Image (cartoon, rainbow, N blue to C red):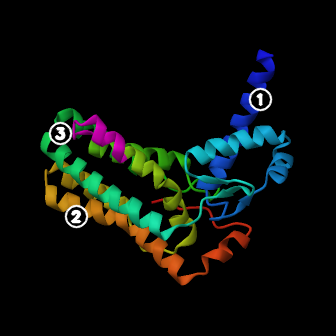
Amino acid sequence: MAGIDAGASTRTDDVYQVLHKDLLGGRMTPGERLGLVGLSARFEVSQSVTREALIRLAEQGLVVATPQRGFRVRELSVQDIEALTEARVQIELVALQLAIERGDIHWETSVVAGHHLLEKTPMVSDDGRFNEEWSQRHRAFHRALLSGCANPHLDAVAAELRDCAELYRRWYGALTDDNDRDIASEHRLLKELALARETHSAQSLLRTHIERAPLRLIAYAAEHDMSALGQRDSVPAAQGL
């Protein structure tokens, strides 16, 4: 019995990992229905295995479970984007201010190291797809930037809100045209301003850095019939934030 349970758990994790990558890679559209029968056939697993994987994604806010209607990709909600962005700006700007005030040499070292790894990692892989390693190092750099606040509760809330915004960031890259943005320069300047203890300028840049993707995504939602998005087969690979 233990072997069977372990096998089912492994299959569930495999399905979860693929669907998680598809969601964050922009290969599933906002509001798209996720049928158990079709997904189970795709992965050659039972519907119970697929359901468990979808439940895990629902717990992360990437998928919505509706009674009698099954699972679907989270909708692109302008109201949710606005509320989430407002919360992120408020929390991250306070954390950054405290990090600049309290950060020591160890904090400075972590910021420099985090930025160096991010800058040396290409955003797009050789096959043209979004590079997941860049995403991991992007997250690590921003966590390092705020870690000097020396408040684990504040740091945890900031990280949780950033994770909640991940799907929206991917949709920003997949659905909007923001080719004139120089994200590398934004990160480089954030690092420099923080280390120079230029609190006001660093906060101003961080606010702009956080708000740009949501504003572009909201503009996209206003310009398009969002109800039609679920009818599309796919969207281009996400380009990140």
Q: Say which element carries label 3.
A: loop
Residue 140 on the magenta segment: no
Q: Which of the two discs, 1 and 2, labels the residue nearer the N terminus?
A: 1
Q: Of helix, strand and loop, which one carries label 2?
A: helix
> Which mark, residue 204?
2
Amino acid type, mark 2:
Ser
- Residue corresponding to mark 3: 103
From the viewer's side, name the closer residue of 109 and 175.
175
- Kind of residue at disc 1: Ala
Q: Is residue 120 visible?
A: no
Disc on res. 8: 1
Mark found first going from the N terminus, 2 or 3: 3
- Number of the front mark, 1 or 2: 1
Question: In the image as oriented, which residue stretches furthest toward the top?
Answer: 2
Q: Position of residue 134 (x, y in %)?
A: 48, 49
Q: Bounds of the magenta span?
A: 147-158
Question: Disc 1 and disc 3: Cα gap in Å?
Answer: 46 Å
Q: Residue furthest front?
A: 67
| Residue sitting farthest toward the bottom | 223
